[in-house]
Amino acid sequence: MRIVVPAGGIGGARFLRGLRTVLGTDATAEEQTTDSSITVIGNTGDDITLFGLRICPDLDTVMYTLGGGINEEQGWGRTDETFTVKEELAAYGMKPTWFGLGDRDTATHIVRAQMLAAGYPLSTITEALCDRWRPGVRLLPMTDDQVETHVVVNDDQGRRAIHFQEWWIRHRAALPAEQIVSVGAEEAKPAPGVLAAIAEADAVVLPPSNPVVSVGSILNVPGIREAMSAKTVVGVSPIIGGAPVRGMADACLSAIGVETGAGAVAAHLGPDLLDGWLVDDADAGTDVEGIEVRSRPLYMSGPAATEAIARAAVELAAELAGKRGDRG
C-alpha cells in the first residue's frame, strides 16, 4: 500500500515507527519486504526562529525517531544530548531561556539555517537532512512557506498573541487560550510533492497527533484537506477516556470549543474527511454519524502494541477502500 500520514509531535512519530514495520519499509531491514511506501506530511506550524536559527520541531522529531537518534525517554530532542550552548547563551543574557536547545540538535538547525540563507526551500532542506538519518519514509513539510501557530491569550499583560511554543513550553498551556491561529496558512501552498503523494496514495492515515495544532495545522494549508477528502481516510484517536494520551491537547481543543472526547474529535474532523476512526476500548460504543468507528487498545506501550495499532489502521483503511473506493 501507498500510505500518506499527516503527522506532528511524539505520538505521530512513534505511530510511524509501528506503521513502517507493518508495511515493511524499515530502512534498517536487510531487504524491503514489500513495495509499500509511506509519505509523511510534517507539521511546520510549530516552527520558530530563535537565535537566528529556524527550528522545525515536528519535522525533526519524525526524522530523529525514525532515524534512531531520538531521546526515547522524553520523545523529543537528541539522545545523549548536552546543553553547553544553551548555558552559554543564558550566560550572555540571551532570551528566551525557556526553549531547551541541545548541542546536537543545534547542529541540525545550523545546517537548515545555512541552506535557507542560500535560498533552498524547506522541502529540499528536509530531504538533505534525511539523507543522513534514512528514516524509511519520505518526509515532506506541509509547505515551503512560513506558517506559524500563534495563540491569543488574555492575562495580566492584556490580550495578546504569543507563539505556540511559548504557550506550550513556557506556560505549559496553562494560560487559557481564546483563539489558535495559523498565521500565514491562508496564503501558503502545499510543498512540492504533497498533493501528488496524496493523489497517488491508497489511503491516508491520521496518527494520534494533536488534532488542533498538528493535524489541524496541516489541514489548514489550502488544497491539502480537499485532496485528502477524495481518498479513504482513517484516523487513530489521540483521546482515550476523555483525556489526551500525552501532552495538553485538551487545552487546544478547549480553545476551539471542542469537547475532549474521542467522538467529539472525529466529529470535528468531519465525515467529509474521515471514513474510519479507531478509538480505544475505553471509548467502545462511540458513534459518529457518517464515520465507521472501531475500538481496540490504543496505548502505544511498546513496539508490539504500536505495531498492532498501525496494523489495525491499515486493515481498516483497506477494508473501507474496498467498500467505497476513492471519493471524487
Image: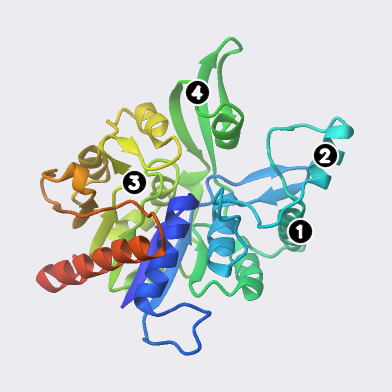
Quadrant of the drawing holding the C terminus: bottom left
In this picture, residue 16 sits left or right of residue 313: right
Q: Earlier in the sequence, mark 2 or mark 4?
A: 2
Please tell me which residue lies in front, 168 or 117. Answer: 168
Q: Which residue is mark 3?
A: 238
Quadrant of the drawing holding the N terminus: bottom left
Q: Single out the residue that lies furthest toward the right.
A: 92
Q: Secondary structure at mark 4?
A: loop
Residue that appears at 51% across and 15% down: 154
Q: Single out the residue that lies furthest toward the bottom.
A: 31
Q: Which residue is mark 2?
A: 87
Q: Which residue is mark 1?
A: 107
Cα–Cα span, label 3 and label 4: 20 Å
Q: Earlier in the sequence, mark 1 or mark 4?
A: 1
Callout 4: 10 Å neighbours few (<14), some, many (20+)?
Answer: few
Cα–Cα span, label 1 and label 2: 16 Å
Callout 3: 10 Å neighbours few (<14), some, many (20+)?
Answer: many
Q: Which residue is mark 4?
A: 174
